[in-house]
Image: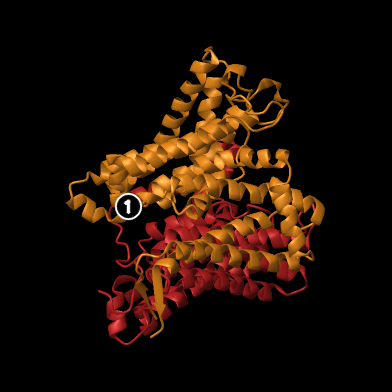
Amino acid sequence: MRLEAKPMPSLAQSLAYPLGAVAVTLVIVSALVVAAGASPFSVFQLVLVGAAGTPFAALETLTRATPLIFTGLAVAVAFRAKLWNIGAEAQLYVGAVVTVVLGTGALPLPAPILIPVLIVASMIGGGLMLLGPAFLKVRLGVDEVVTTLLLNFVVLLFVSMLLEGVLKDPMALGWPRSASVIAEARLPRVVTGLRLHYGFVLAVVAAIAVWFVMKKTTLGYEMRAVGHNAEAARFAGIPVNRVLLKTAMISGGLAALAGFSEVSGTARNLTLELSPGYGYTGIVVAMLAMLNPLGVVAAAIFVAGIFVGADAMSRTAGVPSYIANVMVATALLTMVTAIMLSRFRIRWR
Amino acid sequence: MEALEILFTASFWVAAIRIASPLIFATMGELICERAGVLNLGIEGIMTAGAFAGWFTVYSGGDLWTGVAVAALAGAMFGALHATLTVPLGLSQHVVGIGITLLATSLTYFVYRLVLPEVTSPPRIEPFRPFAVPYLSDIPLIGPALFNQTPLTYLAFITVGLVAWVLYRTPLGLAVRAAGENPAAVEAQGMSVTAIRMGAVMVGSALMAVGGAFLTMSAFSSFFFEMVNGRGWVCIALVVFGSWRPGKALLGAILFAAFDAYQIRLQQVAEGIPYQLFLMMPYVLSILALIVMSRRASYPKALMVPYQKGER
């Protein structure tokens, strides 16, 4: 068998394949639901209601989508330039650490100044976190996939050390937990009394900004060129290594914003439970969005909805909530396959 | 106990070889995949699936070797999925690999919760027992370390020999290596690059799963979440460290495991140093090894390059 490039797909075709991927995912997940002794129809209904059935549920989905938008953007930016950043989890925690270090009273500033300072500082921290692996890649040819993956474990242990050491809240009665950030360092809630905070607005603004940079600026053009064909880009006079290092700073910075917004917006303090793998799920979000920054917002809400909905569903239907993780991973694989099939025709000969 | 004395205790070397065993299986698995030209980032998830499959088989009444076989089969199935997407369809090996890890891990956790909904402490099985090789196990220091281990550890060492023999002494091994270096030449010989690569990924994934099964069937005797804990990623670093050669990779795995066993013991000796710094050391060591080795690393030339029949 061989693959043949298709002509540009029509709008209907380019929609049909992703929808087919969703359908295949639903069939596979249904099989697991049946294996768990429940009815797929009622389970999907429960997930849907749990994710968006009430205003409260819908806002909870948007709250959960916020860190995923940031990590999804981080991955989308990096993967577009073929910088394989699998370390968004580590960069997220660096952003959270920076937020806690500066936001628990070290900088006695009013909120309109302190919050921008925290945003910039955590972005720099996260960017530097990825700059190391990116530097090793361009200078020594060290594969960034493995270094960023391994650094996730190093950073998590480092955070654990901080939480039992210098950052430990003396009032926490033995729990490894930092002190809470001061009132001026907290992102305000969008609706009083509900968890949705302005981090979500910041995430959407970030998505628009990333879209603008990727589509309308020289740097964005260079990043796409490097990702498309690094050799050709170098031949065309694009400073490939410098572009990759800039990409690393942007990508790491975006992932760190997830840590900032989680601490400042919802958690208030830092624990090792801050992220249930948002960094890894960001990869799925970015791929579902086909690396499009605006698509990341939609994909993040979709993925967050599955998680929030599945939590609610598993309480009533008794299907383990890990079904959400299975569904998201399956969606990733079916989606990349669908994108490929929309561009190539398989010839069996 | 002084920091240096640790190195001269038999229990230290026994632990080092025991820690090395799952890494040896999984590193050989990854090495086979990469030698054929496919980076398999599914390793972390496949090890998780293998750890559960082997454990659950024994837990539901199967014998230990059946458990190993079931684990290998589960690994081969995830390998088949990985290979189908990356070899004939030529999808990004990075993305598919991460996807396989996420899928295998979440599917394992889902099935675990399905079959054991209410358990708080993971149930135990009767694991492989150490088997002392007569006479050889009486050698001081080396004897207990190498010749008083569980059968799975012996199997790990046999696997290294077998992989080296097949890769370098058989036509099949030549074909696998050529598929990772110069696939067009393989096709010119009338062989199918697709079939060789898919086979290599399936066999390699089966070995990764057996590596995972070692954790539940020889080391810990029960399954718990996040038990693989980055071992898969370490194995990818070990393949680079071993320059894609089975013997060197084995040496790397033992060196790494000795270091890991050492830091565990050092924690008890060194007072006042946060234990997390010790736990970090294996990962930091892997990164350092990558940096040192990558200067002279000779990647298989067609690694991560999808092959299309008739293309140059």
Mark 1, residue position: A227
Q: Is residue A125 left or right of residue B133?
A: left
Of residues B281 and B176, which is closer to you in this image? B176
The answer to whether residue A325 is above or below residue A165 is below
- Residue A1 point in image, percent of width and height: 39, 81
Q: Is residue B83 visible?
A: yes
Q: Amino acid at mark 1?
A: Gly
Decide if residue B143 is in sight here.
no
- Of A50 and A84, the residue lying toward us: A50
Kindly identify which chain the residue marked by label 1 belongs to. A
Give the colour of chain A. orange
Relative to B179, is A278 above or below?
Answer: above
Q: Which chain is red?
A: B
Residue B194: quadrant of the picture? bottom left
Helix, strand or loop at label 1? It is: helix
Q: Position of residue A22 (x, y in %)?
A: 58, 62
Quarter of the image that includes the N terminus of chain B: top right
